[in-house]
Image (cartoon, rainbow, N blue to C red):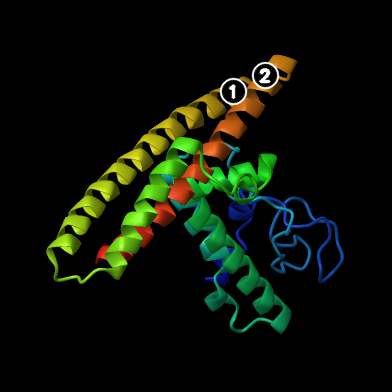
Amino acid sequence: MSGHIHNTDDRRELQMARSMCWHCQSEMAGEYFCDRCVKVQPVSKDLDYFTCFGLPRRLALDPQTLETKFYELSRAFHPDFYQNKSDAEQTISLGNSAMLNTAYRTLRDPIQRAEYLLDLEAGSVKDIRTTPPADLFEEILELQDTLDEFRASDRASESASTLRTKLHADRATLEQRQRDMEAQLQQLFGRWDALQNRGETTEQARAERGRILKDMRDILSNRTYVKNIVNDLVATIA
């Protein structure tokens, strides 16, 4: 199996881990294995998840392509293949595998992928806004009042039954709002990819890029808020 790990053709498909081999100090040539001493190299902490898989920063990714690249790299870094290697190589394989698993989990989910791209391009989504827009805020305040009333009620009473029915309806409304947000995000994902594919560097293109990122940030922030409220609602009426 080790022969497969260090196969030259496989290594040519991998992105550069670092500029110099940690073991023999020879110059690296864009591979995760040193040509001279054939030691595994650590994934650079500066390497973003898209680059790790050799993918462009796009929001529409082919799941099969992502999965194929993930398994290719997994075979190269899996700790089982390094049980008889040095402590340093075992540590590197564990670190590379952990980073690879996190990268794969992030990119295979469309929402997490968008949040990660925004983190790369324009700062973390979590730092954008802590309160929802006015109409959603009012809706949530009313829902919170209903939830508080339901929590304080006798669950076997008729009033509790009425409140539960209302909360189920509120849940359906919020879940529909969440689906609408996700549909809006899909449109923005398409606009982002199209803009990136054009590769324009004009002032107009930069302005459009900024607007798309801002709209995605806002919707993702609101979606997270709604999702948390729905989770609270479900837990309460379960």
Which residue sits at x=72%, y=69%? 39
Classify mark 2: residues with Cα within 10 Å, few (<14), some (14-19) or many (20+). Answer: some
Counting from the top left corner in percent of width and height, residue 23 is at 81, 71
* Camera-side residue of 195 and 65: 195
Specify whether 53 is left or right of 29: left
In this rendering, the answer to whether 197 lies above or below 144 is above
Quick one: SS at disc 1?
helix
Quarter of the image for the C terminus: give it. Answer: bottom left
The residues bearing labels 2 and 1 have C-alpha atoms spaced at a distance of 8 Å
The reply to whether the C-beta atoms of the residues labelled 2 and 1 are less than 8 Å apart is yes
Classify mark 1: residues with Cα within 10 Å, few (<14), some (14-19) or many (20+). Answer: some
In this rendering, the answer to whether 108 lies above or below 232 is above
Quick one: SS at disc 2?
helix
- Whether residue 66 is visible: no
Disc number for residue 76 = none
* Camera-side residue of 43 and 41: 43
Counting from the top left corner in percent of width and height, residue 130 is at 59, 49
Specify whether 21 is left or right of 228: right
| Snapshot quadrant of residue 165 | bottom left
Which residue sits at x=73%, y=20%? 201
Specify whether 214 is left or right of 181: right
In this rendering, the answer to whether 98 lies above or below 10 is below
Which residue sits at x=25%, y=68%? 153
Disc number for residue 205 = 2
Residue labelled with disc 1: 195
Counting from the top left corner in percent of width and height, residue 175 is at 31, 45
Of mark 2 and mark 1, the one earlier in the sequence is 1
Q: Amino acid at mark 1?
A: Leu
* Camera-side residue of 188 and 177: 177
| Snapshot quadrant of residue 218 | top right
